[in-house]
Image: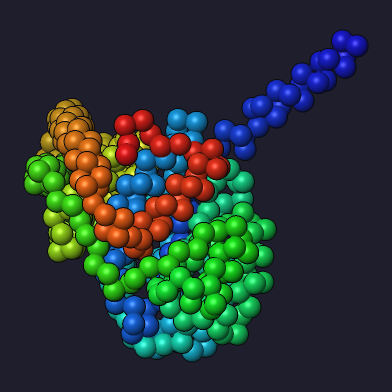
Amino acid sequence: MNRFLFLLASIFLTSLFSPALFAQRKIQVAILFDTSNSMDGLIDQAKSRIWNIVNEVSSLRYNGTAPDIEFALYHYGNDGLEPSDHYIQQILNLTTDMDLLSEKLFGLRTNGGSEFCGAVIGRSLSDLNWSANANDLKMIYIAGNEPFNQGPIDYKSECKKAADKGIFINTIFCGNYDEGVRTFWKDGASCSNGDYFNIDSDRKVVHIDTPYDKDINSYNDSLNHTYYGIGSYGRMKKASQATQDENAELQSVAVKAERSIVKSKGGKAYNNASWDLIDATEEGKDIKEIPEEDLPDEFKGLSDEEKEKLLEKKKADRIRYQKTISDLAQKRQAYIDEEMKKRSDTEGADDFGSSVNESIMKKAESAGYSKESGEE
């Protein structure tokens, strides 16, 4: 009897402490855009909403721990793409680099085309390194306005592959709800237990300006001064960081504020350890081992002790600016929540961003994720 009980206890403890149970969780999102001529409005909506989406995703926790966040980007239905590839191109592989996601999104251009939904879904399933962990959240969003069953690849067979991998296909039809049903966009979502939405892709995103946006963006500029590129790659990425700030601001002051809030979270939401001195040293890189010529100018010519002292000061500055932006962000969200109560249902109609956010939050909750305390 004692041996039997010991065996049961061993099996229980082995399962309890198995690596899969405690593995770092991931949220993987692949976005597939129709970039034919009629889709300029869709791309504009995405540009206006991308930082709002990243903010929502980065608020999720699994057992209190922030998951890794990865985005991928494809476009299809564009005459500038190769017919032999079914007019499909991967713009961005799954990445944690949110500045690169912004850069690629703002680089999209529309140009005629034949839209093959089954084919682009199939490409994203085969190209991307999807997690095999059943507790990870894996989402595909495909947006467009032509019949879902066009092209040489049967969307139903690709949906089955996605369902077998635990990947949800969520469809966003740019047009009338019933037309999307008739042209199989709803079926394209249902077959993998995903969500179907219809949007007016020509509808301008309405941003709620708040009394806090200006201060948030001002502190964002201060936050930028705590980023130091390592070597030539770091200098290039530092310049890209500024460019993506500008791209967000061109959409609106509110969009830049949403980007600033993402940056204030750092960690899983905005990590630049591949090029930034502070993030890199936080992940174990030793500043003393960086060649002098690759150091940022402010750190050159210093003793090891002076480098460490300056680095700690800059880390403290970053934390302070991030905390200030985070506090302002909570006030900003409270203001937006109050303003939304005053608006009609039509003013809150679905657009690309609200569709993505709604389905991610719904699927995340069913998979055991929750929103971080204080996040709205």
Residue depicted at x 34% and y 82%: 38
Q: Residue 220: image x %, image y %? A: 14, 45
Quick check: 160 above or below 207?
below
Residue depicted at x 51% and y 48%: 363
Q: Residue 96: image x %, image y %? A: 39, 52
Relative to 170, 334 lies left or right: left
Quick check: 290 above or below 120?
above
- In the picture, residue 79 is in which quadrant? bottom left
Q: Residue 350: image x %, image y %? A: 36, 61
Residue depicted at x 61% and y 80%: 153
In the rendered image, the quadrant that contains the N terminus is: top right
Residue depicted at x 64% and y 59%: 163
Q: Nearer the viewer, residue 370 or 69?
A: 370
Q: Nearer the viewer, residue 254 or 242?
A: 254
Relative to 107, 358 lies left or right: right
**Outermost residue toward the right in this view:** 1
**Outermost residue toward the top in this view:** 2
Q: Is residue 155 visible?
A: yes
Q: Is residue 106 visible?
A: no
In the rendered image, the quadrant that contains the C terminus is: top left
Q: Residue 328: image x %, image y %? A: 17, 36
- The colour scheme applied to this rendered structure is rainbow
- In the picture, residue 252 is in which quadrant? bottom left
Relative to 156, 342 lies left or right: left
Q: Nearer the viewer, residue 367 or 207?
A: 207
Q: Nearer the viewer, residue 276 or 95?
A: 95
